[in-house]
Amino acid sequence: MSGAAARLIEVRDVWQVYGARIVLERISLGIEAGSFVTVVGPTGCGKTTFLRMLMSEETPSHGTIRLAGAALPGEPTADRGVVFQRYSVFPHLSVLGNVVLPLEIAAAPLLGRLFGAARRRAEARARTLLEEVGLGHAASLYPAQLSGGMQQRLALAQALILKPRVLLLDEPFSALDPGTRADIHGLMRRLWEETRMTVVMVTHDISEAFRLGTRVLVFERPEPDDPARGARITHDIPVRRRAPRNGPGDDPTAGTIAREDGLARASSDQMESSDRIKML
Ligand SMILES: Nc1ncnc2c1ncn2[C@@H]1O[C@H](COP(=O)(O)OP(=O)(O)OP(=O)(O)O)[C@@H](O)[C@H]1O
């Protein structure tokens, strides 16, 4: 398959303008099916705005976004799952109920409920996924009874139950403590490897961006104080991993990340940029 044919998302000359303020300008890129793209950049540079456009929660002021060769639908669709930093799950539903709900809405959009055998099938599917994300024991609990890490595992399960082609993540792990975050990184990579879905993740954490991503995009405003200049993609960095020591079943998040050789040569500029971002 040629590179162009494998592109699932095609962004062409996208701008986003709010009143007199240009937030994003000249954003063009292709995202290959199965890639894990991470987006970093200073606060307020338009990362979430970019993600919201991929979700169809916002329309670009200018330019086009295509998904699988067709114009992006005008509203969010089940083939694009999403997880936010917080509040992705419904507090009044049990853990199981939260994961069954997307199946109910997809199968019975008017009632939003399934009954009898259809409900049992949906619950069995949800329980399997809950086991996969490490929440098999927590199916009858409510979100308020879960730790932050468990809530984000639940949010991932809820986003994955409809098997989206694209998973959009907006700082999903940033509120977690470092140990919990490391665990969920392992889970995220395993889910990504198993499903081969395409992931676009916004993060403030540059080491997380390189640990999880196959490609890191840096958004930056060339003139931060000039409202007439929006952010652009200033660096587009492929990431490759060294093989794990004991084979592919080993720790998928082992921190052995290296840049593509060609880019390593140009990386001092990029590291300066990365350091700047880290400090913001
Ligand atoms: N609907 C809107 N109307 C007006 N301005 C908006 C709107 N949405 C976002 N903005 C502005 O666009 C800019 C970019 O916001 P965005 O949330 O995309 O940035 P970000 O890079 O995700 O920031 P952070 O890293 O702090 O989360 C901000 O100045 C924000 O105030």
Image (tube, helix red, strand yellow):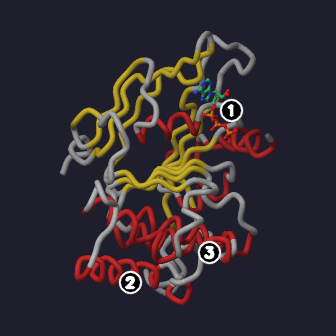
Left or right, residue 223 beside residue 124: right
Q: Nearer the viewer, mark 1 or mark 2?
A: 2
Query: Of the residues shown, which amino acid type is indicated by label 2?
Result: Thr
Dot 1, crowdedness within 10 Å: few (<14), some or many (≥20)?
few
Query: Of the residues shown, which amino acid type is indicated by label 1?
Result: Gly
Instruction: For ligand 1, tell me if the residue under mark 1 lies within 8 Å.
Output: yes
x 54%, y 80%: residue: 251
Q: Which residue is mark 1?
A: 44
Q: Nearer the viewer, residue 163 or 262?
A: 163
Question: Label 1 to label 2, Cα distance in Å?
Answer: 39 Å
Where on the picture, by quarter, is residue 91? bottom right
Q: In the image, is residue 174 above or below residue 42? A: below
Question: Label 2 to label 3, Cα distance in Å?
Answer: 16 Å
Q: Which residue is mark 2?
A: 128
Disc with the residue nearer the chain's start (3 vs 1):
1
Q: Residue furthest left?
A: 1
Q: In the image, is residue 271 above or below residue 199? A: above
Q: Nearer the viewer, residue 138 or 279?
A: 138
Q: Which residue is mark 3?
A: 150
